[in-house]
Image: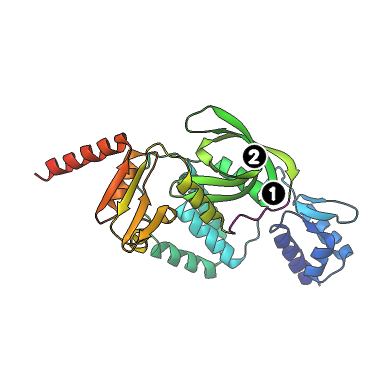
Amino acid sequence: MATDTTARTLRLLSLLQTRREWPGLDLADRLGVTVRTVRRDIDRLRELGYPVDSARGHGGGYRLASGTDLPPLLLEDDEAVAVAVALRTAAGGLTGIEETALRALAKLEQVLPRRLRGRVTALQRAVAGITWEDRGPRTDPALLAALAVACRDHETVTFDYTVRNGPPAARRVEPCHLVASGSLWYLLAHDVARDDWRVFRLDRISAVAATGRRGMARPVPGGDPAAFVAHRLSTAPTRYRAVATVQACADHVRARTRGLAGRVRPMGEGTCLVDASDDSLTRVAQTLATLGTDYTLDADPQVVRHLRDTAQRLLRATG
């Protein structure tokens, strides 16, 4: 009987860690017990130091609250393996995350069961990463975590956002998804004041504050957050304009220019337009270099000068 009670309590803890709030009837149904038994198991968790909040009345429920200490977490086998591998590789584009990730990994590997340790070791040996010197924008892990919680809980937040050519402006949004692209992170959110979807770069966000107001989950147009963000980024205004008429079919160009699928437009048999516009002259040149075929270019004077200077340096280097 004691074993059954312990197993049920651990199962209850696992359920509480997967959702923001659970109605008591749902927990009882999942565990196959009465609501009264759920209440007793909740009391056992509280005695063990887990801060479980409860709401009375119709529709009331339970949720794990934040406490003064982080209580132990229950992870399924596949979850533990995923966390260990993610910590081993660490998230790109985050300031100061490497050392923190290694400390957390050491704690996790110390308690991993032997059956899982072998899987994690095999994955780590099979997966390798290349670390390049990155001078690009870095994202604060605390900011990333705060916005991830807001996305999970559908909680409205406010923050200051700095646009490319202007001062910071106050925004009030309903966060939806976080999307990573290389070393950059983006927040896909519904802007309350503008009543429209917006994409925000995390390195331009500051002074995030939760409002305590929660709403319903909004469906992302098209159903794919990453595709939506990629499309918005491809159509956003850029500092330097560069449009190439390429002597190749659109499918061939898309295969060579990853991430620009939404900026490749078929023009006819064997011809397409590629919008290589960007905020960086270097990235414009890199995009054009990947085309691998002949093209004519319609571009800003700054782009033309940069490409000519680059070409002359290459010619001098090769004699």
Q: Is residue 80 left or right of residue 23?
A: left
Most foreground residue, 234 or 33: 234
Q: Could you say which quadrant of the image residue 78 lies in?
A: bottom right
- Structural distance between the alpha carbons of marks 2 and 1: 18 Å
Q: Could you say which quadrant of the image residue 251 lies in?
A: bottom left
**Residue kind at label 1, given as amino acid type:** His
The reply to whether residue 140 is in sight is no
For the residue labelled by badge 2, is the local secondary structure a helix, a strand or a loop?
Answer: loop
Residue 219 coordinates in the image, percent (x, y): 65, 56
Residue 258 painted magenta: no
Q: Is residue 147 left or right of residue 4?
A: left
From this view, report whether residue 254 is shown above or below residue 183. Answer: below
Badge 2 density bin: few <14, some 14–19, many ≥20, Cα 10 Å: few
Residue 96 coordinates in the image, percent (x, y): 47, 41
At 27% from the left and 49% from the top, the residue drawn is 296
Most foreground residue, 212 or 165: 165
The reply to whether residue 189 is in sight is yes
Residue 30 coordinates in the image, percent (x, y): 78, 68
Q: Is residue 69 left or right of residue 283?
A: right
Magenta highlight range:
216-222
For the residue labelled by badge 1, is the local secondary structure a helix, a strand or a loop?
Answer: loop
In this figure, which residue is indicated by the disc labeled 1? 154
In this figure, which residue is indicated by the disc labeled 2? 194
